[in-house]
Image: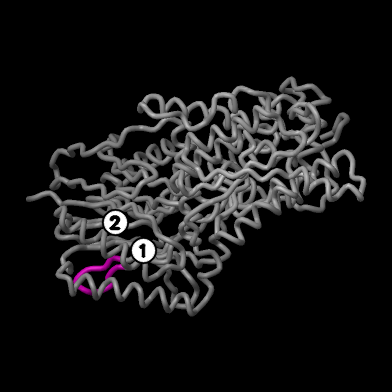
Amino acid sequence: MAPTRLALAQIDTCVGDLDGNVEQVLDWSRRAAAAGAQVVLFPEMTLTGYPVEDLALRDSFARAADRALQTVATRLADEGLGQLSVVLGTLGRDRGGRATNRAVVVAEGQVGAVYDKHHLPTYGVFDEFRIFAPGSGPCVVEVGDRRVGVLICEDIWQEGPVAELAGQGLDLLAVLNGSPYEEGKGHVRTELAARRAAEVGAPVAYVNMVGGQDDLVFDGGSFVVGPDGQLLTSAPQFVEHLLVWDLPPAGGAQERGELAPAMSADAEVYAAAVTGLRGYARKNGFSSVVLGFSGGIDSALVAAIAADALGGENVVGVSMPSQHSSDHSRDDAADLARRIGADYRVQPIAGIVASFDGMRLTGLAAENLQARVRGVILMALSNMEGHLVLATGNKSELAVGYSTIYGDAVGGYAPIKDVDKSRVWALARWRNQTALDAGEVPPIPEASITKPPSAELSPGQVDTDSLPPYHLLDEVLDAYIEHAEGREELLARGFEPAVVDKVLALVDGAEWKRRQYPPGPKVTALAFGRDRRLPVTSRWREPKGPVDV
């Protein structure tokens, strides 16, 4: 008995681009067939893109998805690929007409087996239970003489669907996934899949989508794991890839195929930011970006990410010095532009700011005016030349409201929105070291990494005038935001009461700003936006005295 060749197609689709997604499925199916595969697996909701959110509730969209599926079946048969079993995700409808998250098997010009996702997650970034109706019953298909079980993403995280398949003599469990990236998630997936493989007594083939979709990034990293827990083959992260592996005959030895090299934590997070920006820009029709080049670390890192995502020649960097801008910041901005090959422009703002002198603005109002003038300039360039404006704020600043609405918070996308300040420095050092290792010029000026951070909106200003040192601030923010610890728990950790009270007050008072901030790629377990939903209007504050429980 010959082995069954399996292909896992981790591809980058776009929500709503049904025609484009059809072409992707056909193209990668051809590649799978050319590689000798009998079965090709595509990710969750490949035809529609994922997540479709409330598009799933539109009958017109559902009808279009049905037509797209039929187009795939017909064209595969017309091209002589009817013998290939194509397993893919799409939008379905149950007998009551409710939307479902569906997997289908296409072969011989027909849509055969159908499976509707059972468990519909509502935690974190997911809101599927509101949109979809759950399926019921197992799905096992015959591919030649092999029995293949089919599940969708969340179904392997829960006990029921896998238990239904145990004891059914499976040769393979195929799992279609739209699993968003977050740091540290990769090993959790493989460990879970290994447990499920042991339960069904067969290898698990886990295919995951790749690419950016709004504030989510999908990292691919598809793999096959054996029932003994051995990783048999794996695909690289953050790139489209066809992973081919031979399922041995019953009783045959399972051989290892290609294994993608592991990425470091910093490499993953940086790649996620690049992937998210590239996907957001291209899928929304932008080929270039514009941002302020301040000479600081945040704008330098965002510029490097943008250059890696779209090419340095497609990055417009604008230096907008005011009367408070230091010479070294101007020099660092120009140096950054040279290093990445950006379109560099200088637009002084002192004269524009001076035109507001009649208002006699002082203090914070005067500082915010400078930031807002810069925002106006960037948006004007966007309107005239069609660039996507990038906001350069990091997660630490966003957490405490250290940004100016309609100023440095302006933009269409925020590449480091979910990266705290301490990690910003780490990623900048990692990116520069990667360049040095490759014999290339480091993209980020060393001075931007080493100098004290400052908004330079008043004489001699540094961030620590308003905030605790970032290493301390980020520790408090991680405990309060990521782990939902209250004041009592923070004090028990050993943080000073004055620091805790200041940080909590800043975070609680900045929810309205975060609601108005542009989207940016999720890279942590808890990102602002979909992950963390708090009321803007709330009088709750952490108690400052002893609390009776």
Amino acid type, callout 1: Ala
Image location (x, y in percent) of residue 270? 48, 37
Q: Secondary structure at mark 2?
A: strand
Magenta highlight: main SS:
strand
- Relative horizontal placement of residue 266, taking residue 517 as reference (left or right): left
Q: Which mark is residue 84?
A: none
Image location (x, y in percent) of residue 410? 68, 51
Front residue of 526/228: it is 526
Residue at numbered disc 1: 103
Residue sitting farthest toward the front: 351
Relative to 32, does residue 443 appear above or below in the rendering? above
Count of numbered circles on the image: 2
Callout 2: 10 Å neighbours few (<14), some, many (20+)? many
Residue 62 falls in image quadrant: bottom left
Whether residue 256 appears in this view of the structure is yes
- Lower position in the chain sequence, tag 2 or tag 1: 2
What is the span of residues highlighted in magenta in the rendered image? 105-113
Q: Secondary structure at mark 1?
A: strand
Amino acid type, callout 2: Leu
Relative to 65, does residue 264 appear above or below in the rendering? above
Front residue of 427/21: it is 427
Image location (x, y in percent) of residue 330? 64, 33
Q: Could you tell me which residue is drawn at 85 percent across and 48 percent down?
A: 539
